[in-house]
Amino acid sequence: MTAKASSDSAREIPEATVARLPVYLRALVTLSDAGTETCSSEELATAAGVNSAKLRKDLSYLGSYGTRGVGYDVDYLRYQIAREIGVTQDWPVVIVGIGNLGHALANYSGFRSRGFRVVALLDADPERHQEVVAGVDVRPFDDLEQIVAEQGVAIGVIATPAVAAQDVANRMVAAGIRSILNFAPVVLAVPDDVDVRKVDLSIELQILAYHEQRKANAS
Amino acid sequence: MTAKASSDSAREIPEATVARLPVYLRALVTLSDAGTETCSSEELATAAGVNSAKLRKDLSYLGSYGTRGVGYDVDYLRYQIAREIGVTQDWPVVIVGIGNLGHALANYSGFRSRGFRVVALLDADPERHQEVVAGVDVRPFDDLEQIVAEQGVAIGVIATPAVAAQDVANRMVAAGIRSILNFAPVVLAVPDDVDVRKVDLSIELQILAYHEQRKANAS
DNA sequence: TCTGGTTTGTTCGCACGTTCACAAAGTGCT
DNA sequence: AGCACTTTGTGAACGTGCGAACAAACCAGA
Ligand SMILES: NC(=O)c1ccc[n+]([C@@H]2O[C@H](COP(=O)([O-])OP(=O)(O)OC[C@H]3O[C@@H](n4cnc5c(N)ncnc54)[C@H](O)[C@@H]3O)[C@@H](O)[C@H]2O)c1
Ligand SMILES: NC(=O)c1ccc[n+]([C@@H]2O[C@H](COP(=O)([O-])OP(=O)(O)OC[C@H]3O[C@@H](n4cnc5c(N)ncnc54)[C@H](O)[C@@H]3O)[C@@H](O)[C@H]2O)c1
């Protein structure tokens, strides 16, 4: 097999588009739940909060799934996007660090319906190992390798304190995890073939603060 | 006062740079805590996980705070960035929706040290109003306007279910809040002068899933 | 079948962001 | 003072992303 076209969806999708596909998917689910069968790029764009030209260009990377003069079939497009993202089946996920944030994540029911299944909750603190959160029991962090191997876990979530995050990431990578969602406020060093996405709430607030300060100064 | 130069820091800073300034600030705080007095752009860039040329260009928008042949004074640069972002004083923040996620946010001590003070926790559910979280008592959502006015709140956090989020946003805007951090998986419609930043954990996981699927297909 | 109206898919120009590469500007040693 | 060395700040090339605009494609009705 050469470098290109490993399957029917081997086109290169721009990163900016990839980041918006889940938004479109969410909008389509909402439309579908409301009983809408068809929608135009204009409607979907409004629901997703983007420009309609941008939406059409994004969708064009997946293929030509619309009908000119009509629009898009909601359920059909929804399936195509879900397939492209890879959430037609569930991905097993482990969460490490079951403190304040870890509890909230474990209790969140929204992951399930969006393509993810929390298969394990891990914590280094033995006192946590008594707990059961959302039907899943908290297990020792050292069980990581075994769980990853047994369940085929590819995605790990880090919700430990910042000082522990790099160690946890190292263990995850060694165990075979190649995608990490990191909530700890540190920059993780990982091999090139591992994807890390970070969510830093303080940074989000600081960006808001910057613009707020600008508004206040523009008096 | 004309359109430009309202103070000494009226240069236009690119949005991409604004989003990185908090990362640099965090790295500088870490370096400072470790006792480092001076650092080169290379060191700081490594700590922040970016290219050193990008770092230098970003910093050049703030002014010329380095010394050629030497590098940057950690504490001085740290102060300059904090001032530019606007976190030399604390911003009062309200959190609406004290469920799983709201509790975690309220309990998070990291906001305080990064320029934010949670002044109120609001929830529509009367049963929540018995609670005190992290020393702050949960109050009725209808107290919003009063609290915003009294405390001068400029930033609001939405951690309610998706269906309630737009209503909460409307009330926040009407109360005078112009910066919103939204955790609910919906696109909020707000006036142009209001900033909304969204944090959607399912979207982050789906982006990881997309790349993970790609890796698996590239066998 | 033809015509008018609607909406997609795509081309093109522009703006923004990133990285390279280097002159300018500093330090420290002789 | 002069020289070798280090590191910043920035100009310029390059790549990516965005949005306007429009031809191509489709539907409906006569
Ligand atoms: N709580 C929030 O709302 C919030 C907001 C922004 C950022 N964060 C970040 O998220 C992370 C978690 O925050 P939190 O409030 O839940 O903290 P927490 O202290 O409540 O929980 C951390 C958990 O991680 C566990 N842990 C520590 N070291 C570990 C290790 N090496 N391996 C496995 N588990 C380990 C601890 O036992 C604890 O249960 C922190 O990095 C924090 O900065 C949290
Ligand atoms: N928990 C998570 O880890 C997580 C992850 C991703 C996204 N989210 C999103 O964050 C939001 C909150 O999640 P959660 O798990 O904390 O939900 P939750 O149901 O535990 O809490 C929601 C809280 O909001 C309150 N509320 C409802 N309507 C309100 C209104 N109109 N005004 C004020 N308060 C109101 C409820 O009383 C409840 O206390 C949801 O939109 C969810 O999709 C949560």
Image (cartoon, coloured by chain):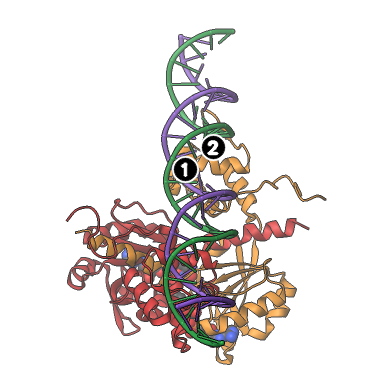
Chain colours: A orange, B red, C green, D purple
Front residue (pair A195, B140): A195
Q: Is mark 2 within 8 Å of ligand 2?
A: no
Circle 1 residue: A44
Residue C14 x %, y %? 43, 40
The amino acid type, in three-letter code, at marker 2 is Tyr
Q: Measuring 51% from the left and 27% from the top, which residue is drawn there?
A: A69
Identify the chain of the residue marked 1, using the numbered disc in the image: A
Q: Left or right: B149 with respect to A112?
A: left
The answer to whether dots 2 and 1 both sit on one chain is yes
Residue B105 x %, y %? 40, 75
Up the image or down, B13 lies above or below B141; here it is: above
Residue B95 shows up from this direction: no
The amino acid type, in three-letter code, at marker 1 is Leu
Do the residues under discs 2 and 1 have CB atoms within 8 angstroms? Answer: yes
Circle 2 residue: A72
Front residue (pair B74, A84): B74
Up the image or down, A38 lies above or below A193; here it is: above
Single out the residue that lies furthest toward the right. A1
Count of marks placed on residues? 2
Residue B219 x %, y %? 78, 58
Quadrant of residue B79 within the rendered picture: bottom left
**Ligand 2 rendered quadrant:** bottom left
